[in-house]
Image: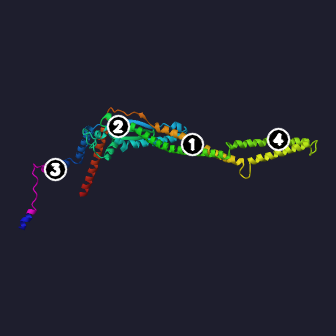
């Protein structure tokens, strides 16, 4: 019994029938391995070269390339900057920044979604009539895969020497390629202006708040001036001080005349003469009047007119400063409102989107040569490794 069990255990499995599917697959595999052994590494390489040449020369779908060259310009450059060397350098750097920003937007997922909504790119790039290696596998691929495929078909490069942004788009027909490039240029300009307008609107909102604050401050300073005038009963303390100063000057001039007259009278009259006494009385009255007027102008107690004038000038200065700030804020507000409605950045087209006349992609001859050279190089490496292994076995 044990002997029979052992005998059944070592009984070999019967090979598959020649007519069964497994038998046919095994026969093809053995035939392929036999062909590889018979032909050698370079025979397989020749087959691979033939396959690559067939694909690139016949099977690969044509792709048309549309190109547009654009630059980004600021429309407020002439009005906001002086045309000196430093301003020119600043404008160049700003333009480079704008063009790099435009490049990033054109290659973004947001732009891809707008393109797909406008031109139905998913259906175009996944067209089943195109070869599987050139097209997208399916129209419902994830957005990340769609973006990856989009980046392989659209390029936006900045020419550092000329400052021109070169936009290229590939499609399976010429009209679609041109439509993609045209939409990129138009939507890029709209997006750049929208970003500038958004910034301008934020600035306008900020300036409006500042204008409201400056207007309130200006009103407060003017009210402070009016309260001061009412409290002191003077419309203009400066004018009143000038009037008092003029009075003192006239009194001093009269005193000088009287003093001269007194000196002349003393030349032939006694000091107690009636004429001399009259002049002395006049001089004393003038001196008293001058002292009173000067006391109104200046005083050590701090209640003189000059103190009032200083306080009034300080209030007037604050009101004038608030008025100047308010005017400046109004000008800035009007300028911001204008900038919020006009085009701040213009995408100038150096070359309009082209309508391709022939398919530039794939580069069939170039790809065939590169594929053949790569296959031959790999075959040579494999052949060399096999020779090394055989030498070590021997």
Q: Using the image as rendered, state which of residue 317 and residue 341 is in the foreground.
A: 317
Of discs 3 and 2, which sits in the foreground? 2
Label 2 close to label 1 by CB (< 8 Å)? no
The residue at which mark 1 appears reads as 326
Q: Observer-nearest residue: 224 or 53?
A: 224
Q: Earlier in the sequence, mark 2 or mark 1?
A: 2
Most extreme residue toward the left is 1
Secondary structure beneath label 4: helix
Dot 1: what SS? helix
Rendered residue at 91%/43% (across/down): 274
- Contact check, label 3 and label 1, Cβ < 8 Å: no
| Foreground disc of the pair 2, 1 | 1
Residue on which disc 3 sits: 30
Give the quadrant of residue 120. top left
Front residue of 67 and 150: 150
From the top left corner, tell me how far across and down residue 43 is, in percent: 22, 45
Distance Cα–Cα, label 2 vs label 1: 49 Å
Please name the residue shown 48% across and 43% down the image: 205
Name the residue nearer the viewer: 71 or 319. 319
Pointers 3 and 2 in contact (C-beta within 8 Å): no
| Circles 4 and 3 in contact, beta carbons < 8 Å | no
Element on which disc 2 rests:
helix
Q: Nearer the viewer, mark 4 or mark 2?
A: 4
- Residue 254 is marked as 4
Badge 3: few (under 14), some or many (20 or more) residues near its Cα, within 10 Å?
few
Q: Alpha-carbon distance for marks 4 and 2?
A: 97 Å
| Figure quadrant of residue 134 | top left
| Mark closest to the chain's N terminus, 4 or 2 | 2
**Circle 2 residue:** 180
25 magenta-colored = yes
The magenta region covers: 8-28
């Amino acid at each position: 019994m044990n002997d029979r069990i052992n005998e059944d255990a070592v009984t070999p499995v019967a090979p598959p029938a020649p007519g069964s599917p497994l038998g046919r697959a095994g026969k093809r595999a053995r035939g392929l391995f036999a062909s590889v052994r018979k032909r050698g590494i370079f025979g397989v390489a020749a087959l691979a070269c033939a396959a690559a040449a067939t694909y690139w020369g016949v099977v690969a779908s044509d792709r048309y390339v549309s190109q547009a060259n654009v630059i980004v310009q600021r429309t407020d450059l002439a009005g906001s900057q002086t045309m000196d060397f430093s301003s020119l350098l600043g404008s160049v750097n700003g333009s480079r920044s704008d063009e790099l920003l435009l490049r990033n937007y054109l290659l973004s997922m947001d732009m891809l979604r707008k393109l797909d909504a406008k031109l139905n790119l998913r259906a175009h790039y996944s067209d089943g009539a195109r070869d599987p290696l050139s097209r997208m596998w399916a129209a419902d691929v994830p957005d990340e895969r769609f973006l990856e495929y989009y980046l392989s078909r659209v390029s936006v490069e900045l020419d550092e020497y000329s400052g021109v942004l070169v936009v290229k788009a590939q499609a399976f027909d010429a009209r679609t390629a041109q439509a993609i490039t045209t939409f990129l240029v138009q939507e890029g300009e709209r997006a750049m202006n929208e970003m500038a307008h958004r910034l301008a609107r934020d600035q306008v909102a900020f300036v409006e708040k500042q204008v409201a604050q400056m207007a309130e401050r200006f009103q407060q300073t003017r009210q402070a001036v009016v309260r001061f005038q009412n409290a002191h009963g003077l419309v203009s303390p400066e004018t009143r001080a000038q009037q008092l100063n003029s009075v003192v000057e006239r009194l001093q001039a009269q005193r000088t005349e009287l003093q001269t007259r007194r000196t002349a009278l003393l030349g032939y009259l006694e000091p107690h003469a009636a004429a001399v006494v009259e002049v002395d009385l006049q001089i004393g009255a003038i001196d008293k009047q001058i002292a009173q007027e000067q006391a109104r102008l200046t005083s050590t107690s701090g209640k003189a007119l000059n103190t009032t004038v200083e306080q009034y000038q300080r209030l007037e200065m604050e009101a004038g400063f608030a008025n100047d700030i308010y005017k400046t804020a109004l000008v800035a507000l009007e300028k911001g409102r204008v900038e919020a409605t006009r085009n701040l950045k213009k995408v100038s087209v150096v070359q309009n989107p082209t309508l391709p006349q022939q398919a530039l992609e794939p580069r069939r001859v170039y790809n065939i040569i590169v594929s053949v050279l790569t296959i031959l190089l790999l075959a040579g490496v494999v052949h060399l490794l096999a020779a090394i292994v055989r030498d070590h076995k021997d």
